Amino acid sequence: MQSVSSISRIWRSIASNARNLFLFKDPFVRSFSTVPIGVTSRKLHRSDIPYHFLKWGSLGFCRTSRFATGFSPLEHKPLDSIVDIERLKNRYPDDIASIWDDYHIGRGHIGATMTAKLYHLLEHRAKECRYFVIPLWRGSGYTTMFVQVQTPHILFTGLEDYKARGTQASPYFTVSFYTEFAESKDLVLIRGDIVFTSKLTDSEAKWLLETAQSFYLNDVRYKLVERFNKETRDFEFKDVLQALDMPIL
């Protein structure tokens, strides 16, 4: 567990230096395979990195930039490999959402949905502000998660793990957004995959997904995301704790 002071030191050191299963083609398929974050084929350029990330000298430019830009460490499963899209086309949006949510319960996955309007807002804001930190409360303290929103994906890993392992740190939890029904049903399907069940429970992963979305979709909370990405020196972790009604240790 971490206190605000320890989080501040970490951050500043980094900154300065089963219903309707017939619809599903494979009820046991996992959307992602585990691959270290550092595995990526994309060549990176300094112009891709937000200004304050270039100041993370203690980790070195290469280690930091690979985590902070467009990496592709996970094998994405297309929606049609999970669900029979043709059958779902004839369902009402509420029915599709209910089927999707129920299917993912208890499978090490998180199923959720959102409207197309909210997804487009998330997508728009993530283009300018991809990164954030979220405290995950556990008992009498919290573990801090480092978040990258790069639609149609969100990736979560432990801040301490990333601090220690850099781009070799694997994500604990990954999220994918499927927009196949965005225009026709005003519905975006969301699938979360817990990569390490030893790191996160289903309920913790669900809370992280909901909380991350709240910081991007709520205008007041999004100001903290903007400050984290654009005005790093003015960012205070205690403001995140206060927004989540968590005690400042």
Image (spheres, rainbow, N blue to C red):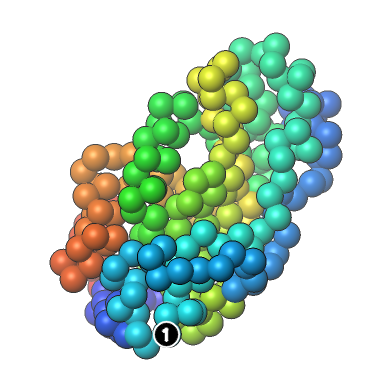
The residue indicated by pointer 1 is 59
- Residue shown at 28%/70% (left/top)? 52
- Residue 97: image location, x then y, percent: 59, 25
Q: Amino acid at mark 1?
A: Leu
Q: How many tags in the picture?
A: 1
Does residue 45 sit above or below 111 in this rendering?
below
- Residue 44: image location, x then y, percent: 50, 68
Q: Quadrant of residue 214?
A: top left
**Quadrant where the image shows the N terminus:** bottom left
Q: Is residue 173 visible?
A: yes
Does residue 160 sit above or below 179 in this rendering?
below
Q: How busy is the neighbourhood of tag 1: few (under 14 within 10 Å), some, or many (20 plus)?
A: many
Does residue 96 sit above or below 167 in this rendering?
above
- Residue 241: image location, x then y, percent: 26, 60
Q: Is residue 151 left or right of residue 213?
A: right
Q: Quadrant of residue 33?
A: bottom right
**Quadrant where the image shows the C terminus:** bottom left
- Residue shown at 21%/43% (left/top)? 220
Secondary-structure class at tag 1: loop
- Residue shown at 54%/44% (left/top)? 152
| Farthest residue, direction left | 234
- Residue shown at 81%/45% (left/top)? 28
Q: Is residue 229 left or right of residue 169?
A: left
- Residue 226: image location, x then y, percent: 25, 54
Q: Is residue 133 visible?
A: no
Does residue 126 sit above or below 157 in this rendering?
above
